[in-house]
Image: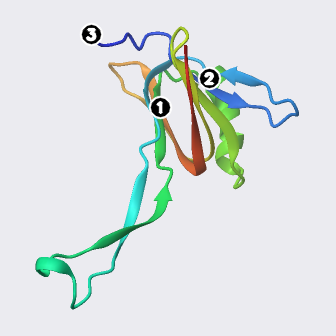
Amino acid sequence: MAGLDAQGTLLQRGDGGDPEAFTSIANLTDISPPSSERETHDVTTHQSPDKHREYIGGLVDGGEVSCDINYDPREHDSLRADFEDPDPRNYKIVWPGTLGDVEFAAVMTGFEYSAAHDGKLEGTITFQVSGKPTFNPGV
């Protein structure tokens, strides 16, 4: 199968309401979805077969989400409130067309931007996922 076009992928921010409404964050150029990791615990004993270490799975870290943006203070400075808030907020990444989405709660951990003398205004926002992301397949 050939690859899928990423054009049209969205990162949306929840408003905390009930029901919750989501608004797209503008001018995204690159989105890195959650990259989960699982800890392992060494349970090797003197009776472990063939002198090989044995492991069991531990806690799962939901990972980080990062996004590069064409920085526009009129669009993005409102997100600074998320950076100042220690409580997780709901976000979702919506895949193009009918490919589904990934929902997650997260704390914003980074808000960086730059203004090179010979370039554009650009930035990166980073989130630490809190809890388990929900992967909703499309049709």
> Looking at the picture, how far across and down is residue 109, in whole percent?
55, 49
Asked if residue 116 lies left or right of residue 70, the reply is left
Q: CA distance from mark 1 to mark 2?
A: 10 Å
State how far apart marks 3 and 2 are (Cα).
Answer: 29 Å
- In the drawing, what numbered circle is on residue 2? 3
The type of residue carrying mark 3 is: Ala
Point out the residue furthest to the right here.
18
Please give the name of the residue rendered at 62% of the width and 23% of the height, measured from the top-left corner. Answer: 25
Q: Which mark sits nearer the N-terminus, 1 or 2?
A: 2
Looking at the rendered structure, the kind of residue marked 2 is: Ile
Please state which amino acid type lies under the numbered disc 1: Cys
Residue 68 in the figure: left or right of residue 53: right
Q: 73 or 67: nearer the eye? A: 67
Quadrant placement of the C terminus:
top right
Q: Position of residue 32 (x, y in %)?
A: 42, 33
Q: Which residue is mark 2?
A: 25
Between disc 1 and disc 3, whose residue precedes? 3
Label 2 crowding class (10 Å Cα cut-off): few <14, some 14-19, many 20+? some
Q: Is residue 110 visible?
A: no
Residue 120 in the image, given as x and y percentages of width and height: 41, 18
Query: Foreground: 116 or 6?
Result: 6
